[in-house]
Each structure stands twice: as C-alpha cells, then as structure tokens.
Amino acid sequence: MQLFLFEDRHFHSFHPLTLTRPVDDLRVGILTIREKWKYSMNATVITRNLRKVLSGIFDTPSLNPDKDCYLINARLFPDEAFIKEILSLQPNEGLSQNDVLLAGRISGKKGNSWKNDFPENPGNLLKLKSYEPKRTITGIWNLFKMNGEEIRRDIKLINPVLLEKSATISPRSLLENIDEIYIGKNVVIETGAVVTAREGPVYIGDGAVLMAGSITRGPTAICDGSTIKMGAKIYGNTTIGPVCKVGGEVSNVIFHSYTNKAHDGYTGNSLFGQWCNLGADTNTSNLKNNYGTIKFTDWHTRKDQDTGEQFLGTVMGDHSKTGINAMLNTGTNCGVCCNLFSHGYPPKLIPSFSWVNSENSSVYQFDKAVETMERTMARRNVKLTPEYIKMMKHIFDHRVES
C-alpha cells in the first residue's frame, strides 16, 4: 500500500501551526494525520507534496514506480466508508467535493514526479466522482473540537495494551475504570495521582510520568515521554504530545510536542505547536464575558471571522513563549517564535518573531531567536539543523505577509 498525502490550497487555514509543518503533521488525538492514515490503511510507504520552505525537515520517500498509489487530501481523516471508496478507485480516477480533490489513484511513477511538481489543479487530470466526506478539517479550531473523538478512534487504531509490565504504579494512586486506562512501557504513576476514565479513555504513552497529586480525566492522551506535574488538573479532550511538561489547569487543549506549561495557570480550547513555553501563571481566556461567539483573525487574510464557537482560547506557533502572569485573550492567534511578557493583554493577532512587552511590540532579532532555539532544543537532545534555520529565516523574512 502506497499513499501520497497532499496539501490543497486551504493549507494556510491552519497557520501559524502549518508555517513549520505540513498539514499531515498536525496532531489530533494521539496521532498525527499522517500516522492515522498509516495505521488505517496499513501503508508501507507514505509520501507528500512538500512546500519548499519545509524541505530537508520532513521527508518525501520515493514510491515504487511499478505500483499504483492513492492520493489523499491531508485535511481529511480516515473512516471506514471513505477508505472503502478510495480502495474502489480505478487508475486515474478520483473523488471530489465542490471542485476540491479528496482522493485519487495514480501510478507510483506519476506520484514520484508530483512530489516536486504537484499540479495546481490535480483533479483536472483525473476522472472524478462526487463524494461527501464525513470527517474534514476546515478551520483550525476543528482540531481541538475533534480531539476527544480522535483519542477514542486512535486507541482502536493502535490497539495499545492496558498495562505494560514495566510500569511503576503507586498503590496509593487511584485508577478509576481501569479497563479504559492504557498504560505504556516504563510509565510512572506516583502517590496520590488520580486517573479517571469514567467519561472516556486515558492513554499514557511509554516513559510518561504522572506526578503525585495530579488528576487526569478522560478522554485524554499523554504521549511518550511527557510529564504531568504535581497537582495538575487535566480535563478531558486533551492531548499532551510527546516530551511535554504540563501543570496547572488544562481543558480541551492540544500540545503538539516538546512544549512546556509546567506551572499553575489555566488554558482551555487551545492549540500549541512545538517548543512553546508558558510562564508561571499564564492564563488563556476561552470564553467572552457576554457568552457570545468568538472572532478569530485569519492568518492569511488578516481579516476577522466569526467562528461560531463559544469557546476558543489561543493558537500558538512553534517556539513562542510567555512570561510570568501573562494573559491571553479569547481567540488569540500567535505566530512562530514570539516573546509575550506584557502586563495586559497582547494583541489578538501577533505576527511571527514579535517581541511584545507592556509598552510596545518590536521585531525579535533573528540571530537572538536562533540562539534561543538552539539552547531550547539542545535541552532535549534535538539538533538545530541548517534546514531548520533556513525555514525560520523564511518565516522571519515574510513575518507580516506569510
């Protein structure tokens, strides 16, 4: 089975998270979108059409030219009905909705040529059939809204064991509805930690640590190598991606990976990329005082749009950070590599590489930002590569119009 995950023209709807990653690398539930398709279709090879700015950071494996591959729009999630339709396609057939290509079947040879030169309108090259998908992301807030359901679906996909023998669980911890708590290798659950799966499953990945006195409610995913700090309150529909440290109060949030919110403070209905750090007592508002729907500034058009959502907190791109006691308003859209340490609310739209204090907002000097990136990543034994710096320089150079 060979898959080709492609981005369509709506990829910028998921900026700033997709400034530094392809759409298929967005994490929802336990897995990224790419991983969902890999498990769902038992794929041996998955490639993608990669934007040049991401070259050298994400891979584009070669397809077997002698076998067909299936094109799949990266904004779509797998389900049984959609997979059945995909597998029924004949060579050079596709599925579409309102002139948007959803899936197709082409030769591996053509797929290899499309990796570096993806057609502007690939659907024009296929014989199309109409199809109405059930599980599509159209706005960035779809990610946290779908998260609880995706945790349940991902558990069925990966079929984890309930309890690995290497786990260390204090007899003074409390695990409620144990048949819905999945505990990986070398997990540590300390004295007084509470895990309740009464309202949904809890997935605890390999090497995760739940410190003393923490409380976790399902559906929640705590991925490999992450730590829940002492006294933390983790509400349902939350994903704490690999190698994160999270404390305080968290509800319906996705932390992609390598991100820290280690101290007290509240965040809800929010999305955080990689390498973010929320200072002590950082709080994000996710509900307006008048209980109205929340407007969110589109990253690409810079225009406010009414999301129709009553709950929407912060979207924060990679490497952005807040100082102590920071306050973030409802519907805050923060770019890549920002420093926020004002006493009041910063702007609701914060361009990448912004340095925001109580008096003004200025540009974060690129060389200083790179120094901080390198120190941050080195603490987790991740190398800052020339390709990664090149990507960040592109974001810096286009920080206003990106």
Image: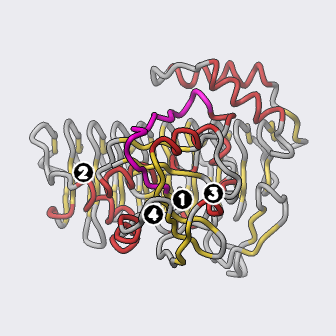
In the displayed structure image, the side of residue 47 where residue 318 appears, left or right:
right
The residue drawn where x is 37% and y is 66% is: 83
- Measure the alpha-carbon separation of dots 2 and 1: 45 Å
Residue 55, placed above or below residue 100: above
Q: Quadrant of residue 152?
A: bottom left
Q: Earlier in the sequence, mark 3 or mark 4?
A: 4
Q: Position of residue 93 (x, y in %)?
A: 50, 65
Which stretch did the figure color magenta? 55-71
Mark toward the start of the polypeptide (4 vs 2): 4
> Residue 77 bears which disc, if any?
4
Which tag is nearer the camera, tag 1 or tag 3?
3
Question: Residue 73 bears which disc, if any?
Answer: 1
Question: In the rendered structure, which amino acid carries the disc numbered 1?
Answer: Asn
Q: Which residue is mark 3?
A: 122
Tell me if residue 277 can be seen: no
Q: Which amino acid type corresponds to the residue marked 4 in the rendered image? A: Phe
Q: Is residue 120 left or right of residue 224?
A: right
- Name the secondary structure under disc 2: loop
